[in-house]
Image: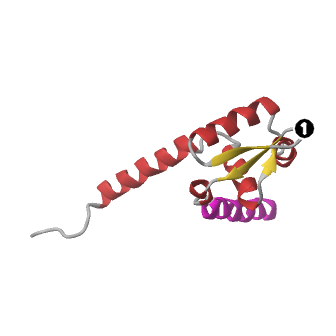
Amino acid sequence: MKHTEENPIKKCGQKIMAIHDTMDVLNGKWKVSIIACLCFTPMRYSELLKEVHGISGKMLSRELKDLEMNGLIKRNVLDTQPVIVKYEITEYGASLKDLTEVIADWGLKHRERIINS
């Protein structure tokens, strides 16, 4: 008897490997929040520092560099006096917008569930 369906254990293993790959890029507490902010509008460093509650300046710098290295955000140095640096989501980074919305929706439902229990 020939199996035309993929082995469910193999499929699960592939999904888990893909999840690990995603989590390696989005690891840590802050990256998803930064991406979510930048999906709405380009922002300056100081704006991100205010918007991403609890992140330190040193950590924000590190996370921005990592996100830029992975091609998820772009650093734009504007030709102004004084120089203004804005961060914006790349087209590749914008592909994570749906993921950030699903995570946010789940978080809202989870918070409501915990508060109501």
**Left or right: 16, with 41 as reference point:** left
Q: Is residue 2 above or below residue 49?
A: below
Magenta highlight on residue 110 = yes
Q: Nearer the viewer, residue 55 or 86?
A: 86
Task: Residue under label 1, please give it.
Answer: 82
Picture quadrant of residue 116: bottom right
Q: Amino acid at mark 1?
A: Pro
Where is residue 39? Give x, y as percent: 71, 59
Q: Secondary structure at mark 1?
A: loop
Q: Is residue 90 above or below residue 64?
A: below
Task: Determine the image quadrant of residue 10.
Answer: bottom left
Residue toward you, 61 or 30: 61
**Residue furthest top in the image:** 58
Q: Is residue 48 magenta?
A: no
Q: Residue at x 54, y 45 (%)?
A: 23
Mark count: 1
The residue under the point 90% across, 40% down is 81
Q: Main secondary structure of the magenta part?
A: helix
- Residue at image coords 51%, 48%: 22
Which residue sits at x=57%, y=46%?
71
| Stretch of the chain drawn in magenta | 97-117
Instruction: Please rate how many residues cluster around mark 1, counting C-alpha atoms within 10 Å: few if below 14, some from 14 to 19, many from 20.
Output: few
Quadrant of the image for the N terminus? bottom left
Q: Position of residue 3 (x, y in %)?
A: 17, 68
Q: Residue furthest left?
A: 1
Q: Nearer the viewer, residue 18 or 57?
A: 57
